[in-house]
Amino acid sequence: MVNELSKALSVAEMKVQYDVQCRKVLAQKEVLAWILKNTAEEFQELSLEEIEGCIEGMPEIAAVGVNPGETIIGMANEDAVNGEGRIAYDIRFYAVVLRSREKIRLIINVEAQKSWYPGYKIPTRGIFYGARMISAQLGTEFCDSNYDDIKKVYSIWLCFGVPDYIGNAISEYRMEKRDVVPGFPDDRASYDKLSVVVIGLKESKSYPNEFIGMLNTLLSPEIPVTQKKSLLKEKYSMKMESGLSREVDLMCNLSGYVEEKGIEKGIQKGREEGENALGKLMDILLSKGDVANAKLAATDEKARKELYRKYGIIEKP
């Protein structure tokens, strides 16, 4: 059991490192420029280089979740409301674009979602994140009743391993005006304040557009790092002499380590054979990002058994 517990603890730590590194790759301005050009209408007419220049400062990255004792990189990535608890954004940043000779400042949130079935609808959670980014502007972007100063927010979700019936897809959810009895002019700027974009990613031999192909290549756990960097440079004209290259190297090295240790395959085998209760529990906890309980399960037998009962896992004698 000691070896199995040690392996499970190693799984938790390695998956956290890999997830954080994925966020660091996505937070590179060159990657964010691709995302903005293909999801936010304000940037569609700009070049990728111009969009990079629109991104203010360095995007903030949240390491994991916000719980007592956990560390967050950048306070801008944490929202707290009395009685509602805390949420941490994977990536959040400001972008400024010129529209009708006026500078428009937007707040952008990018999330990497590992599971398509996390127990809630992705668009619904995106709306919640967007609403929090709007309410958090009180006292910073606008004061008192100056609601016209509210900045538009985007919450953009990259979802991996979506089911076949969805495949590679992009959908936007936003507010629109509907006239019950016509009369009011359509002042879109007064209500166009929140947009949720969901991107479904699934590796394939061909992709519907260049953007989807780039993301699948960038985030593929199957493509070797040398080939990946070559494809990104030659097919998608991405700079591999920059910080992006270093972050991709680190991500691929972590991915290779996970595969080398057989972590993913070992957990999957235990789940399929129904023999490894701890492996199944770790799979569930890590898919939820619940590292605290994963570590607790690996070291505390009583807590482990309570978690078995909670998730309906039968421990074979």
Image (spheres, helix red, strand yellow):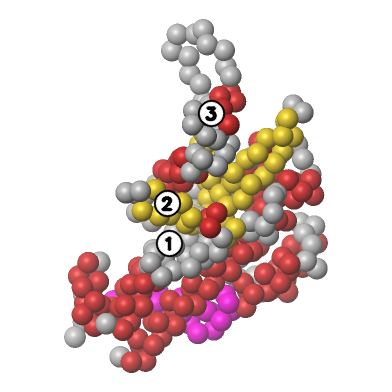
Q: Amino acid at mark 2?
A: Ala
Task: Return the residue at label 3.
Answer: 146
Q: Where residue 90 sits: x, y (%)?
A: 53, 58
Q: Residues within 10 Å of mark 3 (few under 14, many from 20)?
A: few
Q: SS for tag 1?
A: loop
Spatial distance from mark 1 to mark 2, Cα to Cα?
A: 10 Å
Q: Left or right: 139 with respect to 216?
A: left
Q: Residues within 10 Å of mark 1 (few under 14, many from 20)?
A: some
Which of the image's four quarters has the C terminus?
bottom left
Task: Return the residue at label 1.
Answer: 66
Q: Residues within 10 Å of mark 2 (few under 14, many from 20)?
A: few
Q: Confirm or deny contact between disc 1 and disc 2 (CB under 8 A).
A: yes
Circle on res. 222: none
Indicate whether residue 22 is drawn in magenta: no
Q: Where residue 67 sits: x, y (%)?
A: 39, 64
* Residue in the picture at 42% in, 51% down: 80
Q: Where residue 221 sits: x, y (%)?
A: 58, 69
Magenta residues, start to end: 254-275
Q: Where residue 179 sits: x, y (%)?
A: 48, 14
Indicate whether residue 256 is drawn in magenta: yes
Task: Return the residue at label 2.
Answer: 80
Considering the whole magenta stretch, tell me its main secondary structure. helix
Decide if residue 199 is in sight here. Answer: no
Q: Amino acid at mark 3?
A: Asn
Q: SS for tag 2?
A: strand
For the residues carrying marks 1 and 3, which lies nearer the camera in this image? 3
For the residues carrying marks 3 and 2, which lies nearer the camera in this image? 3
Q: SS for tag 3?
A: loop
Which of the image's four quarters has the N terminus?
bottom left
Which of 146 and 90 lies nearest the eye of the viewer? 146
Spatial distance from mark 3 to mark 2, Cα to Cα?
A: 22 Å
Q: Left or right: 45 with respect to 162?
A: right
